Image (cartoon, rainbow, N blue to C red):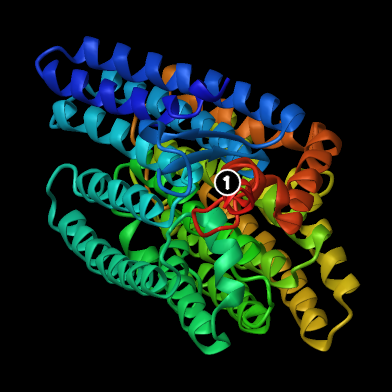
Amino acid sequence: MSWLIPLPVILPLFAAGFALAMAKRPKAQLAASVSTLAIVLGIAIALMVITHSNGPQVVNLGNWSAPVGIPLVADRLSALMLVVSSVVLLGVMLYSMAQGLADGDEGAPVAIYHPTYLVLAAGVSNAFLSGDLFNLFVGFEMLLAASFVLLTLGGTGARMRAGSIYVIVSLLSSMLFLTAIALTYAATGTLNLAQLSQRIPELDPGISLVLQILLLVAFAIKAAVFPLSAWLPDAYPTAPAPVTAVFAGLLTKVGVYAIIRTQTLLFTDGRMDTVLMVAAIATMIVGILGAVAQDDIKRLLSFTLVSHIGYMIFGVSLANQLGLSSSIFYVAHHITVQTALFLIAGLIERRGGTTSLEKLGSLTKAAPALAILFFVPAMNLGGIPPMSGFLGKLGLLQAGVQHQTPLAYVAVGAGLAASLLTLYAIVKAWNKAFWQEAPRPLPETNVPRSMFLPAAGIASIGVLLAVVAGPLYAYTDAASRDLHAQTPYVSSVLPDGERGDGISDEVVEDE
């Protein structure tokens, strides 16, 4: 079934070309986008089942075997990320389709939106499946190009400024990543991740540390890890609701995924674990303090996004099985919940005419269904039991206690404080927007059911994660074991007997 692996990358790219050719036929674009994303979701689910039953699956592009060729690898981690990202991409596409129909597509550059969105989907899939460091860079660049177009849709001044900040920061990250790739190849002679796992431990420790720092900084910028996160709260809130939602849900998690993959596969000596834990603590606290100070829902959610990235990095920094498993669980939870909240923020803006908490109010009377829809994922984000946010945080805190170091205990305290402050910020926002009396009459605008349902669907998935938390945690435990063992990934990519230098043991024996 390895032929399924490249399809999540290839199908969106072909659909993007078709959508561009159908620029004057918006219905054909919609059909191509929705059907392609639905097929990709089905493929991702199939890959998740196959990898869980049979181990990592590999396809070598161009039929060039590793380490010469470029492999695409689906293991438990990448398959789970593919499933969650495909759900989000499809849900956001349905939401944006409904928004376009409700608005009559006035001023919306539909001919650009669909092809760009599909390229973004292909970039996300390529990043998750890449078994080669340079191909991972290609995935990030696909994301960058598509993100800039989506972020500046409409061409308003605010969006152009936000897009410029985003591009400058992303280019800086890409330059660091490309420098790290060049140095890695110079030091090891390969960019294949499986082969790098064998060669990097043999390098001089100083060289290995330089490579690790460069990659971590590049990925930390993309993941919005403090102090490299200042760009995010200014970049995301200005974009249209569907774009902001998919950015908040997915793009930073691609950076987190890259950190997880490289830390567990390439750099296993633990020399940067303390630095990562300090960064996680700072990210949690600084992010949530920024959220508490906000009076706009989108900016508040943007700061909570930064804060909760800290939980994921905390799990990685612990370098134990429970911490990594809980981090993977929390990534899946946060993708769905954060996407749902930004979509709902778009509905609030549509019904209330603004996302400013100083200008909103009385939405419970005006839109009770919207009040419930916001409340459920908001409580999930705040970590109210027995929701998935609580279960993910509980696993991370337990892993921190098991670590039994003073810094880990500090991180556990920071996680508890950040969770309480998240709850405070979310409750404050709900109280001002929905419960208190509005300072001005609300616009006579109704939320279309076709926009409400996709947001409700993604929010429901966040609740469903708590229902299936037992099997999902068992899955993430298995993924964590595989990542720590490395053998399942490496042995599936490199041929039998491969020594990591392109010469098999059989050839050596024959000689």
Instruction: Identify the element where label 1 is drawn.
Output: loop
Task: Point out residue 74 in the picture as x, y percentages from the top left corner.
Answer: 58, 37
Q: Amino acid at mark 1?
A: Leu
Classify residue 160 as left or right of residue 184.
left
Task: Point out residue 242 in the picture as x, y percentages from the top left corner.
Answer: 37, 37
Task: Point out residue 51 in the picture as x, y percentages from the top left corner.
Answer: 68, 31
Q: Is residue 452 above or below residue 264?
A: above
Residue in the image at 47% along x and 49% along y? 67
Classify residue 210 as left or right of residue 28.
right
Query: Is residue 389 in view?
Result: no
Residue in the image at 29% along x and 46% along y? 142
Task: Point out residue 53 in the picture as x, y percentages from the top left corner.
Answer: 76, 27
Q: Is residue 263 above or below residue 497?
A: below
Residue indicated by mark 1: 494
Q: Nearer the viewer, residue 437 or 208?
A: 208
Classify residue 18 as left or right of residue 297.
left
Bin the neighbour count of mark 1 within 10 Å (Cα to Cα): few under 14, some 14-19, many 20 and up.
Answer: many
Query: Is residue 10 in view?
Result: yes
Which corner quadrant of the image does residue 318 belong to? bottom right
Q: Is residue 126 above or below residue 159?
A: above
Q: Nearer the viewer, residue 499 or 261?
A: 499
Residue in the image at 37% along x and 46% along y? 244
Residue in the image at 86% along x and 75% along y? 403
